[in-house]
Image (spheres, helix red, strand yellow):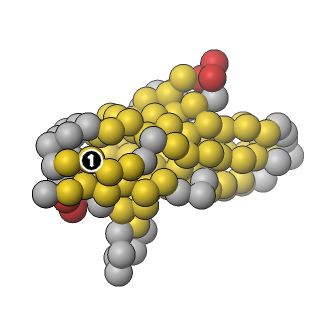
Amino acid sequence: QVQLAESGGGLVQAGGSLRLSCVVSGNGFSINTMNWYRQAPEKQRELVASIGSSGTTNYADFVEGRFTISRDNAKNTVFLQMINVKPEDTAVYYCKLDGRTQRGSRLAAWGQGTQVTVSS
């Protein structure tokens, strides 16, 4: 019904920048909120940023103004622009969709994740 495909991860030095992308495909659903999560080794998955259907954005405290979530509705794509990255940003980053089926049931979907590694 819905598929998410992340890209843009890789190796970057501390202080550098990276842009993650998430392409949404499928049919029979509507999107309420798109989210970026991350999970570092030995840590729980945590919410990084979200953007609602109206464009409202929210960020975790640790973002500290360094990341920006945005979307291109025409291309069914959500982005996470990361600047001034830190080694502690190293994690697998996941795209998550929260929405509704055509029947009105709640729908959640996850991407496969993309690795971000920040070197000192």
The percent coordinates of residue 54 (x first, y second) are 51, 27
Would you place residue 46 above or below residue 28 in this image? below
What residue is at 49 percent from the left and 47 percent from the top?
Answer: 35
Specify the farthest residue to the top.
74
Q: Which residue is mark 1?
A: 12
The percent coordinates of residue 111 (x first, y second) are 60, 54
Give the class, few, some or many, for how many residues have Cα within 10 Å of label 1's Cα (few <14, many ≥20): some
Residue 62, by quadrant, is: bottom left
Would you place residue 19 above or below residue 49 in this image? above
Judge by depth and name the residue closer to the eye, 46 or 16: 16
**From the viewer's perspective, is 85 left or right of 7?**
left
Judge by depth and name the residue closer to the eye, 118 or 22: 118
Res. 61 visible in picture: no
What residue is at 50 percent from the left and 37 percent from the top?
Answer: 21
The percent coordinates of residue 112 (x first, y second) are 60, 58
Res. 72 visible in picture: yes
What residue is at 84 percent from the left and 39 percent from the top?
Answer: 28
Would you place residue 47 above or below residue 102 in this image? below
Say what amino acid the circle numbered 1 marks: Val
**From the viewer's perspective, is 23 left or right of 47?**
right
- Quadrant where the C terminus is found in the figure: bottom left
What residue is at 66 percent from the left and 55 percent from the top?
Answer: 108
**From the viewer's perspective, is 53 left or right of 65?**
right
Total marks shown come to 1
